[in-house]
């Protein structure tokens, strides 16, 4: 059942192109308009939504952080993202016009379930993004977008996360369509970009050789940092989480702009620092990130840089350069996360850890 792979996790990482394609399937009607499954919230109600709150835990929470960028950009609806276990304890402001989006691969995460129960008691509408048909969270929601990753066996979420990203983009675009905040042409062109993602992700997988060498090299690292900006920031967090849970190495993700406000004090000679470089664009995002790498490198860090394939500006500051296909900034998480998944899987394998069953963890956390 592992199809010749040593771990379910490695198999699931390689299934991602297929998982993305399946999660995109049948989302457009004959006219090209987006349609999503089991949206039992009327279009009128969706037009009245004045705030979105995404609730989730762990890796699903990071998908939520990416969702915020997409939702606010395409719909202009204010969007907050909150750890599900923190949500109800702060008495969040919820009304009939609040849309709470719960993201959960398993659909059984108790923290997320309790958050949506609280939201519904307060009359908010709840939409679930979930990979498990008929699980508790979608059953208790007003609407569901199912991801089609297929069963995820490895405890660490990979294809689950990837398809959560797809669902978040589709939700954002669907809301933009219903509310008329974006033209149909623009929506179709993003959907076409999304339809190309399986190919891009496949290329990242095919060209992942350097990640394996890197794992051998960094086996004895005591601490690893991950930096990103914009949608690269949640991916930095995800890269760090994967390394903690699989390789048991201390790792932290930061928004690169935050470095100078404290974390840069951690940087020591030869400390590995992974940097996600945004696509080269007209704004200053890319250049700001490049100066972030320079700062850590000047303090002795060993920089492992993920950048667009034709981005020549980073080469002088990269000890190791990992090339990513050219994709729009909002979609970059889908390609940037893959080397991090492979790296954590490989490093844990080399350290002799059980990759599919990391210590102290369970696939589905059904207690609060
Ligand atoms: C990390 C991981 C966890 C889950 C989290 C939420 O690799 O798998 O952080 O993402 O426990 O689980 P779901 O999505 O099932 O609610």
Image (cartoon, rainbow, N blue to C red):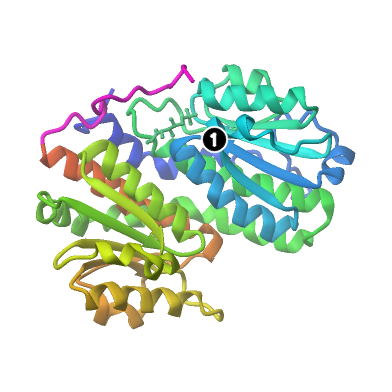
Classify the position of ligand 1 by quadrant: top left, top right, bottom left or bottom right.
Answer: top left
* Label 1 near ligand 1 (CB < 8 Å): yes
Question: Within the image, what quadrant is residue 40 found in?
Answer: top right
Element on which disc 1 rests? strand
Q: Which residue is mark 1?
A: 56
Q: Position of residue 82 (x, y in %)?
A: 58, 41
Residue 79 versus residue 54 in the image, above or below = below
56 vs 240, left or right, is right
Main SS, magenta region, reads: loop
Assess disc 1: are there few (<14), some (14-19) or many (≥20) residues with their C-alpha within 10 Å of its C-alpha. many
114 vs 219, left or right, is right
Q: Position of residue 71 (x, y in %)?
A: 67, 53
Residue farthest to the right?
A: 44
Q: Position of residue 37 (x, y in %)?
A: 69, 32
Magenta stretch: includes residue 151: no
Q: Position of residue 231 (x, y in %)?
A: 50, 59
| Residues shaded magenta | 352-368
Q: Residue at x 39, y 47 (%)?
A: 238
Q: Quadrant of the N terminus?
A: top left
Question: Within the image, what quadrant is residue 335 found in?
Answer: bottom left
Question: Within the image, what quadrant is residue 293 found in?
Answer: bottom left
Magenta stretch: includes residue 360: yes
Q: Nearer the viewer, residue 368 or 320?
A: 368
Q: Residue at x 24, y 68 (%)?
A: 303
Residue 72 seen in the current view: yes
Residue 28 seen in the current view: no
């Amino acid at each position: 059942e592992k199809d010749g792979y040593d771990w379910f996790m490695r198999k699931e990482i390689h299934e991602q192109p297929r998982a993305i394609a399946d999660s995109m399937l049948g989302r457009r009607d004959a006219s090209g308009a987006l349609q999503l499954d089991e949206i039992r919230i009327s279009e009128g109600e969706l037009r009245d939504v004045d705030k979105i709150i995404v609730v989730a835990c762990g890796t699903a929470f990071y998908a939520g952080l990416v969702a915020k960028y997409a939702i606010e950009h395409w719909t202009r609806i204010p969007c907050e993202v909150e750890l599900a276990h923190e949500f109800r304890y702060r008495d969040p402001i919820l009304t009939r016009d609040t849309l709470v989006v719960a993201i959960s691969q398993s659909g059984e995460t108790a923290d997320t379930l309790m958050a949506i129960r609280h939201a519904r008691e307060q009359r908010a509408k709840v939409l679930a993004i979930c990979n498990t048909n008929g699980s508790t969270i979608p059953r208790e929601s007003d609407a569901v977008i199912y991801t089609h990753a297929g069963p995820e066996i490895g405890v660490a979420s990979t294809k689950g996360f990837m398809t959560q990203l797809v669902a978040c983009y589709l939700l954002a675009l669907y809301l933009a369509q219903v509310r008329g905040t974006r033209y149909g042409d623009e929506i179709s062109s993003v959907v076409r970009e999304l339809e190309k993602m399986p190919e891009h992700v496949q290329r990242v997988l095919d060209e992942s050789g350097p990640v394996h060498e890197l794992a051998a090299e960094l086996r004895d690292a005591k601490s690893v940092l991950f930096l990103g900006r914009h949608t690269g920031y949640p991916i930095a967090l995800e890269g760090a989480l994967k390394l903690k849970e699989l390789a048991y190495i201390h790792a932290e993700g930061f928004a690169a702009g935050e470095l100078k406000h404290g974390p840069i004090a951690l940087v020591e000679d030869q400390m590995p620092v992974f940097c996600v470089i945004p696509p080269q664009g007209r704004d200053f995002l890319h250049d700001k990130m490049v100066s972030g790498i320079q700062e850590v490198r000047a303090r002795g860090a060993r920089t492992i840089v993920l950048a667009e394939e034709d981005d020549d500006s980073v080469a002088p500051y990269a000890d190791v350069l990992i090339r990513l296909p050219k994709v729009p900034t909002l979609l970059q998480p889908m390609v940037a996360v893959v080397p991090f998944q492979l790296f954590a899987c490989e490093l844990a394998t080399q350290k002799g850890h059980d990759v599919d069953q990391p210590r102290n963890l369970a696939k589905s956390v059904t207690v609060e």
